[in-house]
Amino acid sequence: MCGEFESTTQKNELLSDPKFHITQFVRGLTNESMLAKVHESGLKISRLRIYQEGNYTNTNETSKLTQETILRLATLVNGVKKITIESRPQFLTEESISFLSDIVRKTDVKLEIGMGLEAKNNIVRNICINKSGTDEQFVNADIFDEDADIEAELKKLFGDPK
């Protein structure tokens, strides 16, 4: 995910209220025109991607209450088999992975966490793209623990950014 520098550093009271993100999620799921288009197309929704302008597992951006509520609601969406969130590797700790894993463990839904590797080169990733994160953080992210029961998705750019 892209960093949401202004909102996380300005301590915007609206954005720090868990109801703000939860309400946005619920409104998205209950958008009548979107639901009508899905119904008309006859397609089944089996995958839900939850993106926000930052980092889902950073509690300075998305509180634990917000993370839990949105994830629990997402597991209840009819037909959804996989939910994808995004995180920076430095926030994928044993504690955060265990917390997320416990939420989805008793459901039929798989959780996937995407990490924006973007580039192999630290200078390109951290200076040109402004992603932050070291190679070591990506390799050591607890998401790769077999007991976590969470799938990992590494996202990278193809070719040099221009």
Image: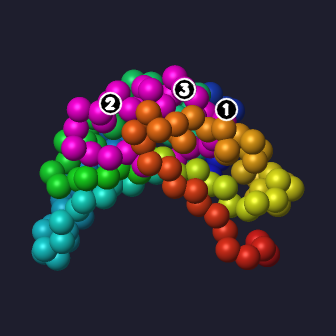
First to last magenta residue range: 86-112
The alpha-carbon separation of the residues under discs 2 and 1 comes to: 30 Å
Count of numbered labels shown in the rendering? 3
Whether residue 27 is visible here, answered yes or no, is no
In the rendered image, the residue lying farthest to the front is 146
Whether residue 29 is visible here, answered yes or no, is yes
- Quarter holding residue 65: top left
In this rendering, position of residue 100 left or right of residue 16:
left
Name the residue that disc number 3 marks. 94
User: Residue 118: image x %, image y %?
Assistant: 68, 61
Instruction: Determine whether 118 is above or below 55 in the image.
Output: below
Please name the amino acid that badge 3 sits on: Glu
Depth order, front residue of 138/12: 138
- Quarter holding residue 44: bottom left
Name the residue that disc number 2 marks. 103
Name the residue that disc number 1 marks. 10
* Label 1 element class: loop
Eye-nearest disc, 2 or 1: 2
